[in-house]
Image: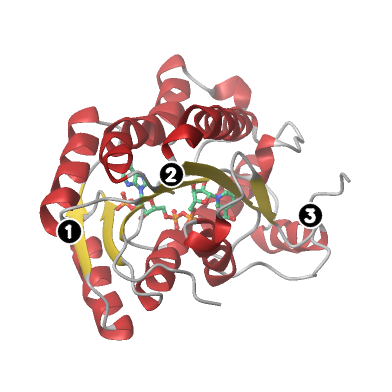
Amino acid sequence: MDLGLTGKAAIVTGGSRGVGRAIAASLLREGARVMISARDPKRLQATRAVLEKETSGEVRAHAADLGSDADAKALIGATLKAFGRLEILVNNAATVMPADFAALTEERWMQVFEQKLNGYVRCCRHAIPPMKGRGWGRIVNLSGLAARETTGRTIPVGVNNIAVLSLTKSLAWALAPDHILVNAVVPYIIDTDIQDETMQRFAALTGRPEADIRRERVAELAVGRMGRPEEVADVVTFLASERSSYVTGAAWHVDGGASRGI
Ligand SMILES: NC(=O)c1ccc[n+]([C@@H]2O[C@H](COP(=O)([O-])OP(=O)(O)OC[C@H]3O[C@@H](n4cnc5c(N)ncnc54)[C@H](OP(=O)(O)O)[C@@H]3O)[C@@H](O)[C@H]2O)c1
């Protein structure tokens, strides 16, 4: 299938590792030009060099903390300067969050939203005008299964991720007249740093061995194994492409069958 991504200009936030890096690699292999972004400039530049070598694609890097509106604006500006256009935004950057609701301070609760939801909102606000200018756009927002299935372990994560789904659906309706499609991807238990940190936090919180927690999580999955970042990237790449032209406001699960609802 020709995805029609050749020459399209894309931003992948949180593109320095994990799911974001896999998304950037996939878009580059399909011929898109990609700007990756994250806070740590050293790791970001190292990833940029690896992606360039692996894919021979046109990849740039711009360090930004998306907890800051000025940084989000500068990221969109740097992309327009580098590529002269912007058609695809993949909102993916997020940090690991504490699980114990009772121990959450006001400041930490606000930080949770600053890092993910508000970062996504900032990037959307600055990316939408150039997409409207081209009369074509794709926004893909990484949410997470805690948005839809709760255990009480992950309250800030769930509230943050359900807000990402609401943002996705609302923007899909607002932007459809401008031929900008907005969708979400809902991952669960993907083998990345954030997943490792989450398992370690649960182990510390409950005083149980990390290996036991890992086994229990895998047992929740119909496929019986953790997901790979590339498996999320494939779905995101389709949603970012020409071929997804009748899909908007949707939330596609990439969760190994963990979600049991029909
Ligand atoms: N892995 C899973 O099982 C899983 C499950 C459900 C949902 N998700 C969602 O999938 C997405 C990707 O997760 P992942 O597992 O790939 O995470 P990851 O391995 O921890 O990578 C996170 C990326 O985001 C960047 N980042 C974090 N905070 C940032 C900020 N304030 N500004 C800019 N960049 C920032 C990080 O780089 P720096 O630290 O250098 O900034 C890194 O590049 C996230 O939205 C996550 O919530 C993942």
Residue 258: mark = 3
What element does badge 1 sit on? helix
The answer to whether 174 is drawn above or below residue 139 in the figure is above
The x, y position of residue 178, in whole percent, is 42, 36
**Secondary element at image label 2:** loop
Against 249, is 2 above or below?
Answer: below
Q: Which residue is mark 1?
A: 83
Q: From the viewer's perspective, is 255 left or right of 30?
A: right
Amino acid type, label 1? Phe
Packing grade of label 2 (10 A; few <14, some 14-19, many >=20) is many
Circle 3 Cα neighbour tier, 10 Å, few/some/many (<14 / 14–19 / ≥20) = many
Query: Mark 2 CB in 8 Å range of ligand 1?
Result: yes
Q: CA distance from mark 2 to mark 3?
A: 21 Å
Circle nearer the N terminus (2, 3): 2
Rendering coords of residue 179 (x, y %):
45, 42
Residue 211 at x, y percent in the picture: 69, 64
Q: Secondary structure at mark 3?
A: loop
Residue behind mark 2 = 94
Residue at point 52% right, 29% down? 167
The quadrant of the picture occupied by the N terminus is bottom right
Residue depicted at 75% across the width and 63% down the height:
218
